[in-house]
Image: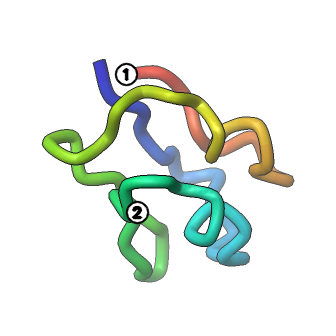
């Protein structure tokens, strides 16, 4: 099960460098590719706005 980024995302970029499989894409609100996400939770741990949740 992949993680998702909610509307609480502030597009700070902290999560992008932490993702070991490069599943996160930039945008107004960042997004996680569910086909690449390995559900490790590293991105959620570093998110300052707590915008990343398990799907």
What x and y, as percent, mark residue 5? 48, 47
**Label 1 close to label 2 by CB (< 8 Å):** no
Within 10 Å of disc 2 (Cα), the crowding (few <14, some 14-19, many 20+) is many
What x and y, as percent, mark residue 40? 51, 29
Q: Which quadrant of the figure has residue 18? A: bottom right
Q: Is residue 29 left or right of residue 46?
A: left
Q: Would you name the residue on which mark 2 appears?
A: 24
Colour scheme: rainbow
Considering the image in quadrants, where does the C terminus appear? Answer: top left
Q: Residue at x 40, y 63 (%)?
A: 24
Q: Is residue 33 above or below residue 45?
A: below
**Cα–Cα span, label 1 and label 2:** 15 Å
Report the mark closest to the observer, 1 or 2: 2
Where residue 55 is drawn, which disc sits there? 1
Q: Is residue 54 above or below residue 25?
A: above
Q: Is residue 23 left or right of residue 39?
A: left
Q: Which quadrant of the figure has residue 10? A: bottom right
What x and y, as percent, mark residue 4? 41, 39
Q: Residue at x 75, y 40 (%)?
A: 50
Q: Residue at x 59, y 30 (%)?
A: 41
Helix, strand or loop at mark 1: loop
Q: Specify which label sits upstream in the sequence, 1 or 2.
A: 2
Within 10 Å of disc 1 (Cα), the crowding (few <14, some 14-19, many 20+) is few
What x and y, as percent, mark residue 28? 47, 80
């Amino acid at each position: 099960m992949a993680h998702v980024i909610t509307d609480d995302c502030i597009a700070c970029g902290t999560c992008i460098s932490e993702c070991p499989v490069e599943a996160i894409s930039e945008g107004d609100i960042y997004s996680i590719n569910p086909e690449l996400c390995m559900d490790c939770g590293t991105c959620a741990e570093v998110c300052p706005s707590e915008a990343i949740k398990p799907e």
